[in-house]
Amino acid sequence: MAGSAIKKAIAVCICILVAVSAAGCGSGSSLSSAQSSAVQSSASSDTVLTVRDRSGDVTRSFTQADLNALDKETHTYSGRSKKDNNKREIKKYTGAELRYFLQEAGISGAKEIKVVCDDEYTKEYEVSDLYDLYAFKNETGPAKTKVPPIITLKDRQLIIGQADYDGEDTKDFNMQNWARGICTIEEIE
């Protein structure tokens, strides 16, 4: 338990350092009052997730309490990960639907985003590609349900559906595209 708390504290410190150093970079001009407030907010030890717009400005810093206050949805997702001998998983997750989250974060028009995770994993996503994906709720196939991408609020994980059933022949490893422990979301386009 203490080890995970230390890792979390280190990850938060890294996110804060990145946010503060990025805010301080540039032409040397002083920060606007909005930027200054955002940097002060991101410097709070309670911040767990920072969102930046295309220009790199912080649009919103979320504490865990902020995330917990967001509207939540629960959906069942399916897929295979490359762990556990490609075992198929069907599991319920609760979180904020991605478009709603991006709206609350101040980047509702984002077409492409980059996520940076606590462990320095970075991945870029086209937002529209994360929709019209499915969950398959049984082991035998084609019954599918459309599921939206969500960000789980407790562990800040982006969960997405599958393009197709993950049968033995297709092995749609959608779970490798999930991102866990997100500390920064940046609007690319």
Image (cartoon, rainbow, N blue to C red):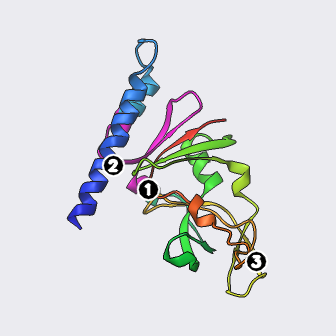
Secondary element at tag 1: loop
Among the two numbered marks 1 and 3 on one chain, the one whose residue lies closer to the N terminus: 3
| Residue at 67%, 35% in the rendered image | 189
Q: Which residue is mark 3?
A: 144
Q: Are marks 3 and 2 in contact (CB under 8 Å)?
A: no
Residue 37 location, quadrant: top left
Residue 110 in the image, given as x and y percentages of width and height: 66, 41
Q: Is residue 180 above or below residue 31?
A: below
Secondary element at tag 2: helix
Front one among 118 and 85 = 85
Amino acid on which the number 2 mark rests in the picture: Ala
Indicate whether residue 63 is drawn in magenta. yes
Q: How far apart are the alpha carbons under marks 1 and 2?
A: 9 Å
Q: Residue furthest left?
A: 2
Among the two numbered marks 3 and 2 on one chain, the one whose residue lies closer to the N terminus: 2
Q: Is residue 31 left or right of residue 113?
A: left
Q: Which residue is mark 2?
A: 11
What label does residue 181 carry, if any?
1
